[in-house]
Amino acid sequence: MLTARRRVVATAAAVVGTTLLLASCGDSDSGSSDGKTLKLWHYEAPNSAMGMAWDAAIKEFEKTHPGVEVKFEEKGFEQIQKTAPMVLNSDDAPDLMEYNKGNATAGHLSKQGLLTDLSAEATARGWDKKIGAGVRTTSQYDAEGVMGSGKWYGIPNYAEYTMVFYNKDLFQKHGIAEPKTFDELTAAMDAFVDKGVTPLANAGAEYVAQQYLYQLALSKADRSWVDSYQLYKGRPDFHDAAWTYGAETFADWVEKGYLSKKSTGTKAEDAGVSFIQGKSPILFSGSWWYGRFTEESTFDWGTFLWPGSDLTLGSGGNLWVVPKGSENKELAYDFIDITMSEKIQNILGNNGGVPVAADPAAIKDPQSKALIADFNALSERDGLAFYPDWPAPGFYDVLVSETQKLITGSAEPDAYLDAVEAAYDKGVQDR
């Protein structure tokens, strides 16, 4: 989330400061190599589909590994995103951790030699057979850290994608029809503005705002455009029709009141809570919210894929990576294997996640079935376009700051595109 994932990931947990992360690295029991401790980090909220599945996996692991303790530490997404290279280059790295996928993150770490090559384990344990081609893209990285080929440096055991979440009760209260097309979506947003309601939940300080803009650009793009931008198969033109449409339309939406000018300092958690509390009728974001919205929302809500676009943000989920300095790699491999088991995959699928190896007949929840069906539709049309911050290390922060300028009106779309192009070129050159 991001990148890009980050897909950048929203969690219910407070994001702990970098100083706390560094302090945790000094724990006297970290790096234990006695085969009796698995030090695990992840940043999924306890009530998210992934959080519930990983909790079940910890219980299963300890049941099948008598005498072995899982020392789990919950981290914030931004916390790991900013400090992972430094932490993993120390003696205090965890044995297993969740990390964001893409060239700027997992690819960057693999190029630096900070991650363990999992290729042999992926083959021996059959993970490569369970993970489909579209999801596999973010698992493998070449010698330059570019995704899509090469060695396996991470294992995603779920998938993710973005969608439009909408509050059916608010639409009904204001007499606004539920949109089915892009024109109907913009008409609905106009109607909300007329009634004094800001239609879109937004977070200018984190990934949400840049993902709105990227989705607008994707609606005018194709697969070759994505490959040029994400996989360096050609040089992207940041003033082409797609990027120009994305930047100009985003700025126009701010002027029209679809997005609040006060949202420059808000974070993803704020956007999600605004939707949960019934304040914002629409949020465009990822499937990582699905389980939380199911549990915490008190109104009727639904989802649909971004209308009028074959492409949307999405990929395999965040990766389990084994740091090069892990002292208990075999235990880490065993834990990954458990998360890939049908039992844990079914838990994931029945709680609003998008599993990669579940038994379809075991998914009983209707909303979960719809979520998985939409993902399958995207996969079948090769519609996963990754996340805007993935191409280069540090690009996420640039996209945050430059998109904030569009929200405040301190930069015009053309200047935004110039700044993004310059940062992209430098980031790709320096990566």
Image (tube, rainbow, N blue to C red):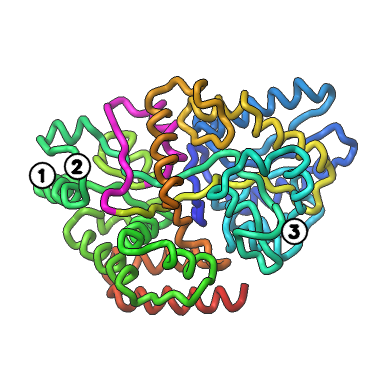
What distance separates the C-alpha of mark 1 from that of mark 2?
A: 17 Å
- In the picture shown, does residue 279 fall above or below 83? above
Q: Nearer the viewer, mark 2 or mark 3?
A: 2
Residues in magenta, as a range: 285-308
- The numbered disc on residue 179 is 2
Local crowd size for mark 3, using a 10 Å CA cut-off: few (<14), some (14–19), many (≥20): many
Check disc 3 and report its element: helix, strand or loop: loop
CB atoms at circles 1 and 3 under 8 Å apart?
no
Coordinates of residue 141 in the picture (x, y in percent): 66, 60
Estimate the x, y position of residue 87 in percent, counting from the top left. Answer: 72, 55
Residue 231 vs residue 266, the one in the foreground: 231
Identify the image quadrant of residue 345: top right
Residue 200 seen in this snapshot: yes
Name the quarter where the C terminus is drawn. Answer: bottom right
Seen at 68% across and 28% down, the residue is 58
Q: Mark 1 belongs to which amino acid?
A: Lys
Under mark 3, the amino acid is Leu
Say how many tags the image has.
3
Please state if 254 lies on the left or on the right of 329 as rendered: left
Of callouts 1 and 3, the N-terminal one: 3
**Mark 1, residue position:** 195
